[in-house]
Image (tube, grey):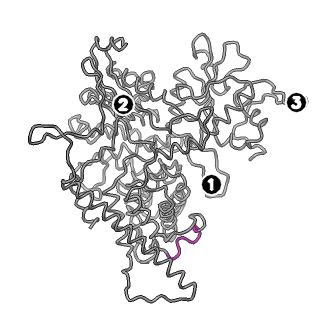
Amino acid sequence: ACWAIAKHCDRDPTLLPASPKGIVQSTDTMLLQGDKPHAWEWNSVPLLEDENGNMGDIDNSSTHATRLEETIDEIAMQLTSILSESQDDDVDKHDNQSDGKQQLSSYQKPKIKIGEICMACWAYGKLRPRDTPPGWPGPPQVGMVTTVTKSTAQNIGIEDEMPVIKFKQLTSRSRPLGNGDSFNDFVTDVADDLEPADVTDTLFDAIGSAICNCSGNIYESRTSMLSGTLLEECTWSELANVGWAFASHGRCTSRESEMLLTSLADEAAYRLRAMGRIANDGNQRMVVRDITQLLWSLGSLQADNFRLADDLVNLVKALTENLRLGTKTGATFAQGRPLRRWSCADLVQVAVALAHARIDEQHLLRSIYEEGIHLLMEGSSPGDLPGDDRRSFHPWEASILLWAQARLHLTGQQAGEFDDFTDGAAKFFIKALRENYWSFSKSRIGPQEQANIAWSLVVLEKFHTVEAIQLLDLIFEEAARSCKEEKSIQLEHAHQLWQAYFILEEDCPEAVERVPDWFVTYLREKWSMEKARDKLSSARHRSLSDTLQLMGVDHINEHDEDIDVAIILQPNAAWVHQTEIGEESSESSGDEGKVLVAVEFDGPNHFTRIHDDADGSPPGPPRALGHTVLKYRLLKKQGWTVVRVPYYEFDKIPFWASMERQRYLQRKLKTHANIQFSQVDISEYKALTPNRRSRFD
């Protein structure tokens, strides 16, 4: 029944009422209309005029949509009950067998079939999609644009006519720890913000428990959890559909869901290493879309649950081995172009999974973008062709691939394919716009795609070609027009556009010379509000600050520009910025000759994931991700000298070795010529050796 409802809703989304939670605006947003402020709420209850002409709340209790919602929830509760009873019966049966007893019953309950469970799982993944994007603390927020009259602006203390908006900060996740706060208090506050599990969450947990037959502690049963479970009976398509359903609904943090998702990754990796053959049919081979869909699901969910990452890395390695990428024997599917048989959706899904999980699997990434170059040459695909019947990208698919490349900061330094793809992508977008009369909507390049393209080209520093300049000019023109007409813009898009504009204003002014002044002011204000939000210092950051304080170095934590530790030096200071930055920064930095030093502690989420090489050699240092590289460039353009303190260097020093941490920062920041710990223990300044190995390695 639930599968049939989901199929109907898949073909006609209007059967279910639209959720108001997809994009929200703060309830304390104030829009000025006339001379009086007016509070506008996104989730306000709509009003309906009754037969007497009076306005009242809509009564949804008798509508078909509400009855359908209630039916869907009722089915979920019934399915949960059936799955739970089945689990209890299995436990009782096991206990009776262990006691030497045999339980006789005249009633035999029907056995739960894995195919039915997978159908129900897919149905609720379709019927109950998540409201918050993976890894986000809350739903996307929209900024409303409105202009107040000059008289009204003067009454509230505003000099000129300007857009007025106020945004609510995101719960306590952004609240810094005060002097009297503890970390447990913060965890409690965050837990209070999380919504309790609803009937669909409970159903997904029951499905995970039934498929994995999990009981007890999740970590105690990991070694044998795949043996004798329903998971072994799943086909490739069932594995993919279950993973997709959990990703679509966003369930991954409970014990049961985590067990299922890690089991899915382990089972798929095992089958890939067995040349792609499934357990219950040795003649059936892997279908590409199944493994790519599973990779996308795990890549999205690990942004919400970091414990899924190791199993995802193992699955990516298994896929690379299965394709025989990087070997002399050639790839499994085709010589020369190993991913020739992959569809456009397959390439996009794997690239997104690797980008979300920060996995720098170069052999697989090079193959993806090599095939992407060939597909870009085919031109854009019409919107009416199904995914399996086309050999060319939709523009939105190409924009996602470009974003994944920028996210992982894949440039020509890693491989020539990445540079070629970026150049080809700009030409591809211009060609698609030209064929659709320069209409972004007809070209299926929406606001999200526009912001991603502009941000990605700036991160990759590929904005100097004629096509890139024209494309960026058109994107900013379209964004300003849409913002003015619709009087709103999603804040995440505004932040991306401002970062791109700030870099292009100096490095490529011809690309942004037609951007209206009011739009530039608006983007700047939204970015300033984002940077001024309350921030929570990490444990590593606090440790770094404590060490600097112990060394007598005055500094500012959580600076307005989102700087971890800001140090302002006087012109005649005894020490200067880090030598690798160069002397040019000090000449142009700060007012009154002050030198501005930004000490950035970069944790694991700022770098690609460290993994061992196939030949067993020690892994090299990870690469900085695109958003981190762009942040450094933004700070340098504002006059800051950036000093990076990567976690893989700082974490080598034990927390109890305070003198060693002082020595490290002395040489990293060039703080003092000598630091005297005692009469016999004196640390002299020495420049750090790149990639040096210490006694803590």
Quick check: is 226 in the magenta stretch?
yes
> How many C-alpha atoms fall within 10 Å of the one at disc 1: few (<14), some, or many (≥20)?
few
- Percent position (x, y) of residue 260? 48, 64
- Tell me which label, 1 or 2, sits earlier in the chain: 2
- Give amino acid for label 2: Asp
Q: Is residue 435 left or right of residue 297?
A: left
CB within 8 Å, label 3 to label 2: no
Q: Which residues are magenta?
A: 221-228
Q: Please indicate, yes or no, whether residue 660 appears anywhere in the rendered image.
A: yes
Spatial CA distance of label 1 from label 2 is 49 Å
Q: Which mark is residue 678?
A: 3
Observer-nearest of 77 and 235: 77
Viewer-side label of 1, 2: 2
Residue 28 bears which disc, if any? 2
Q: Which quadrant is home to the N terminus?
A: bottom left
Amino acid at the residue labelled 1 = Asp
User: Considering depth in this image, is 461 or 111 the residue closer to the camera?
Assistant: 111
Q: Is residue 17 left or right of residue 81?
A: left
| Residue on which disc 1 sits | 612
Q: Nearer the viewer, residue 314 or 334?
A: 314
Which secondary structure is most common in the magenta stretch?
A: loop
Q: Are marks 1 and 3 in contact (CB under 8 Å)?
A: no
Asked if disc 1 and disc 2 are in contact, CB closer than 8 Å, the reply is no
Q: Residues within 10 Å of mark 2 (few under 14, many from 20)?
A: some
- Is 466 rendered above or below residue 317? above
- Upstream in the sequence, badge 1 or badge 3? 1
